[in-house]
Image: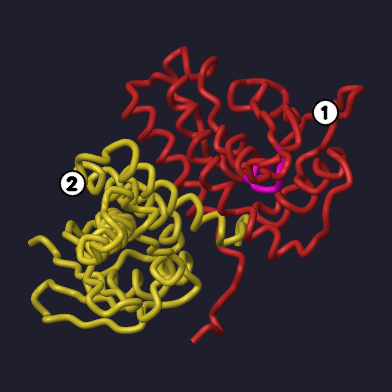
Chain colours: A red, B yellow
């Protein structure tokens, strides 16, 4: 029964489905792109919380020693496994708490054009679901981060760049102390 | 063959889309949520069948188009064909997938889906799980309807999940 089980599928289904969800959200929220960005981030967050398990099972890797290792893991293992791309890790801050991911390819944005209403180019972060996915997935492994896009080729920028900031490592919640 | 991605990406996006429409955007209006999910499926199916039939000659009859859905279209999406096709020869077709992917993967944890129900109220919990599943099926129903509509065959598509994890899609061609 399971002999047909293959892990890779044609990207078109996910690309077209995601694109249709974004345009449906734009219609549902009356082109309030701030709201659309927020909803995409929220959907990503929920997906990320579930995807991390799949990531741990498939990657079979150990613990990351520091945030630099985490960044490499996200790019070379996470994005590679799920989307078969490897965004470039760069632009570290001196304190090693903030880096950029540069996407030179983006399966979500194949065959996409932003709405031509003079605002989407400035306000919509089409691939914002990625930010939520990272935030949700990393939260499940004790890292509180912030992720946001700062440029996107869909908006006419030269590169698609996401900034990722480590806020803090989440300590294991201890039961209330009774000493 | 174009770009490939992990199938968990597809699952993740589809599941979350359904959860978002049912749980957040239209929590109080399941029929509106169903309409939106079906409409997204329709749009995607329409575009996919356009792409998958680019190199093909036009289908000469309904059965040929339905067979295309059962074989090529389904294989592109799920890496397997429809397992069984039945027809009454009067415009109704039943496409059965014995292990429909999105049903074998979905977690029907009623506690998460329906926090209002009390723990002992198993009847309503069951309903809620069934409702979640049926919501999930509006998407593939939309995919099939969109694909056939693009091939010039207007139709209505519904899903029958009376014997899970097998799932039947009933296509009624409009004449």
Q: Residues within 10 Å of mark 1 (few under 14, many from 20)?
A: some
Quadrant housing the C terminus of chain A: top right
How far apart are labels 2 and 1 at the CA level? 46 Å
Q: Quadrant of residue A55?
A: bottom right
Q: Residue at x 38, y 21 (%)?
A: A31
Check the image and report above or below for A42 versus A46: above
Is residue A138 found inside the magenta-colored segment of the image?
Answer: yes
Check the image and report above or below for A58 versus B20: below
The mark lying in front, picked from 2 and 1, is: 1
Residue B119 % position (x, y): 30, 60
Q: Specify the subunit that label 2 lies on.
A: B
Relative side of A21 to A44, left or right: left
The residue furthest right is A94
Q: Residue at x 61, y 60 (%)?
A: B6
Q: Residue at x 39, y 73 (%)?
A: B100
Is residue B3 found inside the magenta-colored segment of the image?
Answer: no
Q: What residue sits right under mark 2 in the picture?
A: B31
Asked if one can make out residue A32 in the rendered structure from this viewpoint, the answer is yes
Q: Nearer the viewer, residue B155 or B137?
A: B137
Q: What residue sits right under mark 1 in the picture?
A: A97
Q: Which residues are magenta?
A: A137-143
Q: Secondary structure at mark 1?
A: loop
Relative side of A130 to B133, left or right: right
Relative side of A15 to A27, left or right: right
Q: Quadrant of residue A72?
A: top right
Q: Residues within 10 Å of mark 2 (few under 14, many from 20)?
A: few
């Amino acid at each position: 029964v399971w002999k047909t089980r293959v892990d890779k599928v044609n990207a078109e289904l996910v690309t077209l489905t995601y694109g249709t969800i974004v345009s449906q959200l734009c219609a549902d929220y009356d082109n309030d792109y701030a709201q659309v960005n927020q909803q995409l981030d929220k959907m990503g967050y929920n997906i990320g919380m579930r995807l991390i398990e799949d990531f741990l099972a498939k990657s079979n890797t150990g613990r990351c020693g520091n945030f630099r290792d985490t960044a490499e893991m996200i790019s070379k293992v996470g994005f590679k496994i799920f989307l078969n791309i490897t965004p470039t890790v760069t632009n570290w801050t001196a304190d090693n708490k903030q880096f950029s991911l540069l996407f030179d390819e983006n399966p979500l944005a194949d065959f996409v054009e932003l709405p031509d209403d003079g605002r989407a180019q400035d306000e919509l972060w089409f691939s914002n679901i990625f930010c939520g996915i990272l935030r949700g997935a990393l939260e499940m492994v004790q890292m509180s981060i912030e992720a946001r896009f700062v440029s996107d080729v869909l908006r006419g920028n030269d590169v698609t760049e996401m900034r990722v900031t480590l806020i803090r490592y989440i300590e294991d919640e201890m039961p209330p102390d009774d000493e | 063959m174009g770009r490939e991605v992990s199938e968990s990406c597809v699952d993740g996006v589809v599941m979350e889309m359904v959860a978002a429409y049912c749980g957040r955007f239209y929590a109080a209006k399941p029929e509106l949520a169903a309409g939106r999910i079906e409409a997204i499926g329709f749009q995607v199916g329409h575009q996919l069948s356009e792409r998958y039939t680019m190199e093909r000659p036009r289908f000469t009859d309904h059965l040929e188009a339905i067979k295309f859905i059962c074989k090529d279209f389904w294989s592109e999406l799920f890496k397997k064909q429809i397992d069984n096709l039945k027809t009454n020869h009067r415009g109704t077709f039943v496409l059965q997938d014995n292990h429909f992917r999105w049903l074998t993967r979905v977690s029907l944890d009623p506690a998460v889906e329906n926090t209002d129900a009390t723990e002992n109220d198993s009847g309503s919990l069951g309903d809620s799980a069934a409702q979640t599943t049926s919501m999930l099926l509006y998407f593939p129903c939309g995919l099939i309807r969109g694909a056939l509509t693009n091939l010039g065959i207007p139709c209505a598509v519904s899903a029958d999940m009376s014997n899970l994890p097998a799932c039947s899609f009933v296509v009624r061609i409009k004449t």
